Image (cartoon, rainbow, N blue to C red):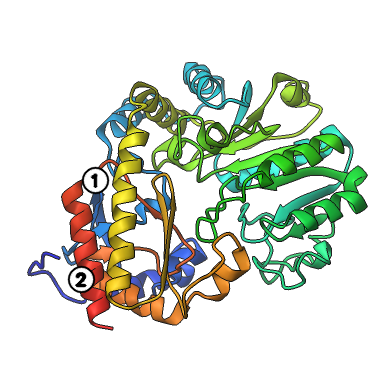
Amino acid sequence: MTQTPVEPLASARLLEATRAVIAGGGSSNMRNLGVTTPLVLDRSEGCRIWNVEGDELIDVNMGYGPHLFGYADPDVLGAVARQLSKGAITGIPHRLDHQAAELIRDLVPSIEQVRFANSGTEAITSALRLARYLTKRDIVVTFEGHYHGWSETMLRKSAITNNGNDPRGAEPGAPGMIPSALTYTLQLPWNDEEALERVFAEYGTSIAAVILEPICGNAGMVWARPGFVERIAELTAKHGGLLVFDEVITGFRMAPGGAQELLGVRPDLTIVSKVMGGGFPVAAFGGSRELMAPLARNEAFHAGVFSGNHAAVSAVVAMLTKISGNPSVYGTLDVATSYLEQRLTAAFADAGRPARVTRAGSVMSVALLKRPQETESDYDAAVELIDFEEHRRFQIRSQAAGLYFHPNPLEPWFLSTAHTPDVLDAVVGIVEESLAQD
């Protein structure tokens, strides 16, 4: 980490001043977790961030994942800058809408038509509302550890302890939620086929949709057991419900067509965001022309003043055009992330520190554990073993040494094309240094 002769407490003082006018200091509770080590940024480029003191850090959080080609990608920024000179939003269809939607359709196997939104939460809320309209049913099935935004019927505490025996046992995920908000939301253990079979046997004719992250990315990159996603698709279709893939993380991140391309399972509705916008606030949900028809006829409802604004959609066109022209980027990132996975696994082993290092494509999960994990595919086992306090201390030491990753060990690491081999070696060096201080 390069030190510069700037006021050493600038981050702490600026953060304190910011908290006077922004509740908690940031506009998301997740951003406010690092309160013991104030970090206020001045700029970002490639895979590096600079705080207001001028200190340089390697970043593997990467804005929670949208920067496949690194921060300040000139192709994306150039496209947005050109569009901004022509206007950011008019509320009228724009030629960019057609370009962006066609690119999504051409890349994602299950999508023929889309609607744009401003965030994953918005797109998921609209997709589930559409599913309920199409099926004339109310119940939505979710899985523990899968995050689908903070809307009233989706935000719930991530873990359950009843082994799926009471799928109605999900609890509201935030104070102030309507107590009955989750009445029609059932939560099942991830990778538990018996619980899945039971819920369809009991509620099958009332289930409007099953929504899932096809690769569980919000709880430590937990892959589905072989055949589990396929069984979800079979049961959902058999009982007349809709299968909804939340590909906010995996969309355009694992492959051009997302996780559904890798798994070979086509959902009825898909939500994409993050990588699609290259750091700009945009999301989309889509499916077949038939399923999207109620929106075209104004029978189902979806709106938003800033949905599909020209600036964000220009970023979508730039990102997806670049991805379409560089399909080999996924192989390159896969090799780089595999290398980092192996080096980190060896570093933790050499230090005698139990840790869980897993990945899917260019997304990784890194977490210190209380003891070695025996059953990889069990979500409960993965979470209950995490040593949150020690991991936080490890994160603080790493940040001081020039490496930033999220304080919460359940938050993934994301690699980009800017994470070159020399950068990855530097990451490993910082991790080894931080473990040596344990």
Examine the image and state in which quarter residue 317 appears: top left
Image x and y of residue 221, in percent: 50, 55
Give the secondary structure at mark 2.
Answer: helix
Give the residue type that dot 2 points to: Ala
Residue bearing mark 1? 46
Q: Is residue 11 visible?
A: no
Q: Amino acid at mark 1?
A: Gly
Q: Earlier in the sequence, mark 1 or mark 2?
A: 1
| Circle 1 residues within 10 Å: few <14, some 14–19, many ≥20 | some
User: What residue does disc 2 label?
Assistant: 401
In the displayed structure, 252 sits above or below 390; it is: above
Location of residue 331 with respect to 40 vertically, above or below: above
| Residue at left offset 63%, top offset 52% | 148
Number of numbered discs present? 2
* CA gap, disc 1 and disc 2: 19 Å
On the rendered image, what quadrant is the C terminus found in? bottom left
Residue at image x 66%, y 44%?
227
Q: Position of residue 134 (x, y in %)?
A: 83, 32
Asked if the residues shown at circle 1 and circle 2 are in contact, with their CB atoms under 8 angstroms apart, the answer is: no
**Rendering coords of residue 416 (x, y %):** 31, 44
- The mark found on residue 110 in the picture is none
| Front residue (pair 178, 227) | 227
Q: Position of residue 407 (x, y in %)?
A: 40, 70
Please state if 110 lies on the left or on the right of 76 as rendered: right
Image-based side of 292 in relation to 70, left or right:
right
